[in-house]
Amino acid sequence: MAFERVGFIGLGRMGRPMARNLLRAGYRLVVYDRRPEAMAPLLEAGAEAAGGPLELARASDLVITMLPGDAEVLEVCAGQDGVCQGLRSGAVLVDMGTNHPDTARTLARAAARAGADFLDAPVSGGDVGAEQATLTIMVGGEAGVFERVRPVFEVLGRHVFHVGPVGMGQVFKLCNNLISAVQMVAVAEAFAVGRKFGADPGLLRQVIMVSSGRSPAVENRPPVPGILPEAPASREYAPGFTTELMAKDVGNFLRLAEAGKVPVPASALARQLYLMALGSGYGPKDYSVIGELFRGWAGL
Ligand code: NAD
């Protein structure tokens, strides 16, 4: 194996199953999460614990982060006692969370100061994709570094793409998530109006699934409890992918569009709707909870 010891930081809904898949593939793994209860199942499965990011970096020749957002990954990697202070020369830091491309470039500079390389490698496919190792992985960075890490990516995902220099993985990922974000708003509106006029929501989903409105939002996240048992709506909107994280991604997409002076009105509206959902206390719920706002406004 090209990497003797892999460090993994951020063992949440995505990171935990991804780290488990690396263990199963035979990698020696050292893990860290600020919540000890997130680390416990991996330690039972054979991973070693690190006391913090610095200790983890000193013990690893590849470090993977899967943290919530820009602030967390910058603190954990580029902050005081962070990963970049402990990275060995020749090591690789890979951020697999979804963040702004500027964050990727900042991390690449911090890694370079330690003589290490950096890749941004955000993923799509959700917690199910993380568990089943069917993620799509979008990688930004130097081609040679990508090739070194490719075998690790192939353990975690099914579709692995090198999409350009550092930061481009995040550009691709933000474009993808923007579509999911806007699509979910459209589905929430359609189900609110349909139900207001008496449509049976299960039948509405069934019809749309074989019509032109078919989309992952309709397939996996119909925003009405009871019509699809495995959908977040049928489990009190347990995530999945939280509203907080979706609001972050749409915010980063808007910053990107603004920097390029590209008008993106649908995204701006979606961002406001996700902020309204946060304001209603829905931050920790799956982002399909946006349907609850429309249900209320429709008087259903
Ligand atoms: P999560 O909140 O479930 O997990 C994040 C983990 O990071 C938690 O275990 C938390 O304790 C840990 N953490 C936070 N701050 C820390 C710190 N300072 N030091 C150490 N550990 C810290 O989030 P998630 O759903 O696993 O998402 C992780 C990333 O993956 C995000 O960037 C998200 O946008 C992206 N993503 C999520 C999904 C999804 O469906 N959930 C899909 C694709 C991409």
Image (cartoon, helix red, strand yellow):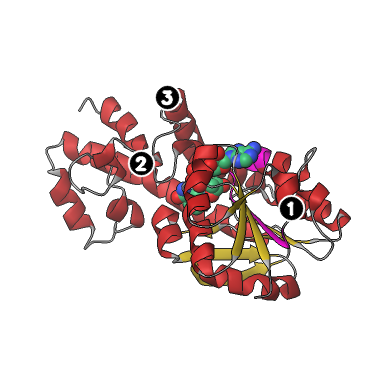
Amino acid carrying mark 1 in the image: Ala
Which of the image's four quarters has the C terminus? top left
At x 68%, y 69%, the residue is 3
Q: Which residues are magenta?
A: 60-72
Q: Position of residue 169 (x, y in %)?
A: 63, 60
**Secondary structure category for the residue under label 1:** helix
Identify the mark nearer the N-term, 1 or 2.
1
Secondary element at image label 3? loop
Q: Nearer the viewer, residue 84 or 137?
A: 84
Mark seen at residue 281 = 3
For residue 288, which numbered disc appears in the image? 2
Instruction: Indicate the amino acid at tag 3.
Output: Gly
Residue 48 visible to an observer of this rendering: yes
Question: Of helix, strand and loop, which one carries label 2?
Answer: helix
* Label 1 within 8 A of ligand 1 by Cβ: no
Instruction: Give the number of the mark in front: 1 or 2.
Output: 1
The N terminus appears in which quarter of the rendering? bottom right
Q: In the rendered view, does 266 fall on the left or right side of 219?
A: right
- Mark 3: few, some, or many residues within 10 Å (few <14, many ≥20)? few
Q: Which tag, 3 or 1, sits closer to the chain's start?
A: 1
Tell whether position 71 is magenta: yes
